[in-house]
Amino acid sequence: MTTPGQWVAGARPRTLPAAIAPVAVGTGLALGEGAARWLPGLLALVVSLGLQVAVNYANDYSDGVRGTDADRVGPFRLVGSGAAAPGAVRNAALAAFVVAAAAGLGLAALTTWWLLPVGVACVAAAWGYTGGSKPYGYRALGEVSVFVFFGLVAVTGTYFAHTGRLTGPAVLVAVPVGLLACALLVVNNLRDVPTDAVAGKRTLAVVLGDPRTRTLATMLLVVPFGFALATVPFRPWAALTLLALPLAVGPVRSIRVRALGRDLVPVLRDTGRLQLVFGVLLALGLALG
């Protein structure tokens, strides 16, 4: 039987900062404007976390039944390792989608029903990454989706849930969050280039090749700090994000010295930590004004 610890590992907890950071930043911006509402903010967090867990289980299921995870060097996979039946993992993904959808319905009821089409698009993107007959994650489009949904949509959606409006600053602060979410995926796919290429999974890392993927990963880890500083003219405390800069040194160094395979697993962990700390500091700076 699959143990609780294996289910937790299959949910890929190291990727959860990608769900927490955008909600924190959207909430921080609303707080700085004196417009934060805690119930919508909490529901937005449940939606984001539910979708992240759902997409992780869905990817585990879809990659597992395709055989993509048959020879992995990365973290534990439920289907690929044989620890859980594919149907059970698919059901776990569906359960997480239901949790996200229920929270999304509550959020729409508190704000506007126009959020429902956005929610449907989020669910479709989460499943379509590796699921269905033509998964876009196998066509080098994963980073685009992550930037849109775990950056632009998550931050501006959270801000909208608090305030009922969209603004230029909300879009601006969403960009670095989306870039760091992309960094997490690029590092993950860089590690898996050899096995993905053999399995026919054409991620962006496979298409670009190792050297250019390392350059892209480095840029995604560094450029967000520039966008954060661009918010300083209207939120001076956003400069607090510079305190997270030392956390980028380790991942960048490992990427530039051409770490491979299992040596990139700690880089994935450190990138998630950077994303979380960056998001919390940016949220705090936006809230302080």
Image: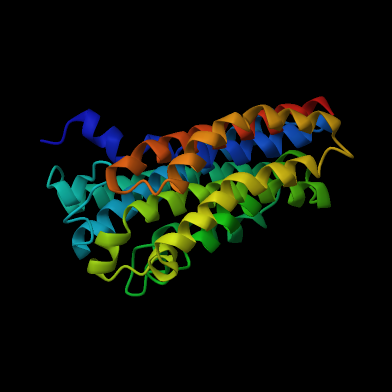
**Rendered residue at 37%/36% (across/down):** 266
92 and 221: which is toward the camera: 221
Q: Residue furthest bottom?
A: 134
Q: Can residue 22 be seen here?
A: yes
**Left or right: 22 with respect to 18?**
right
Name above or below for residue 72 compared with residue 266: below
Where does residue 147 sit, x and y in percent of width and height? 58, 56
Name above or below for residue 237 compared with residue 161: above
**Rendered residue at 46%/34% (across/down):** 270
**Rendered residue at 78%/46% (across/down):** 164
Q: Residue furthest front?
A: 257
108 and 158: which is toward the camera: 158
Where does residue 217 sit, x and y in percent of width and height? 51, 52
277 and 32: which is toward the camera: 277
**Left or right: 69 with respect to 219?**
left
Q: Can residue 157 be seen here?
A: no
* Quarter of image, res 226: top right
| Number of marks | 0
* Quarter of image, res 45: top right
Where does residue 92 sit, x and y in percent of width and height? 29, 45
**Rendered residue at 40%/66% (across/down):** 209
Q: Quadrant of the N terminus?
A: top left
119 and 64: which is toward the camera: 64
Q: How is colour applied across the structure in the image?
A: rainbow
**Left or right: 37 with respect to 154?**
right
Where does residue 9 sit, x and y in percent of width and height? 28, 35
